[in-house]
Image: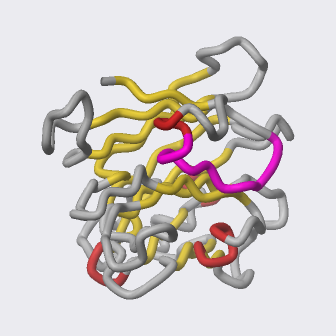
Amino acid sequence: SANGLAGTSVTAAQTVSLAYVFDVALGAADAGIANFVINGESTSDSSGYSISSAGDVNGDGIDDILIGSTNAKSPTVPATNEGRGYVVFGNTGYQSGRMPIDLSAVAAGSGGFAINAQSDATGGQGLGWSVAGVGDLNGDGLADVMLGARYGDSNSLNNNGVDWVVYGKTSSTAVNLSAVAAGTGDRKSTRLN
């Protein structure tokens, strides 16, 4: 891979915004062949800054992937780089030689969903600095995920960091963390101050 981590089960090439997925059981990683690639949404979005197994977020019996994109443009305040998360739904059709997965399609609701940062006119929340699958925290049978916004603002403090839990869901509608913070959005997510 571009960052010298060949042989790892999941790697990220941050400068070119690609994520390579290997099925180590097939031995493809040892041969240096990625089973499929996940392309970043836009130039310099830092897609793949953090990557994690998410568990089965949508309840279809196939594990999903969580990707952090710390420098992604905000869809609500396009001039800022708030960061974004993506849940890419697992699929039995992901096989070697298939077309790459584009996070722009995931953001549009195809094959997963986007997690949009809490918008801030000053920008630079850094959502996706860290990501993790955290199991089923609310007992609904769907895996939940957690994303860190390293420079997020909360409790009238600047750049103190904010962590978000997004509960598993079956739809591919984007989660808007600004609405969650305001109490008007998807209540299947929560902010940890």
Q: Quadrant of residue 22?
A: bottom right
Residue furthest top as drawn: 139
**Residue at horizontal 70%, vertical 72%?**
108
**Residue at horizontal 28%, vertical 56%?**
126
Disc tally is: 0
Residue span colored magenta: 170-179
**Residue at horizontal 83%, vertical 58%?**
92
In the image, 2 versus 192, the foreground residue is: 192
Residue 114's place in the image compared with 2, above or below, is above
Q: Position of residue 4 (x, y in %)?
A: 24, 71
Q: Which color scheme does this rendered protein use?
A: secondary structure
In the image, 4 versus 134, the foreground residue is: 134
Q: Is residue 36 magenta?
A: no
Q: Quadrant of the N terminus?
A: bottom left
The answer to whether 95 appears left or right of 52 in the picture is right
Q: Quadrant of the C terminus?
A: top left
In the image, 1 versus 125, the foreground residue is: 125
Q: Position of residue 43 (x, y in %)?
A: 38, 87
**Residue at horizontal 29%, vertical 51%?**
129
- Residue 11 seen in this snapshot: no
Q: Position of residue 29 (x, y in %)?
A: 49, 65
Q: Is residue 172 magenta?
A: yes
The answer to whether 37 appears left or right of 147 in the picture is right
The answer to whether 180 appears left or right of 187 in the picture is left
Residue 147's place in the image compared with 38, above or below, is above
- Residue 82 seen in this snapshot: yes
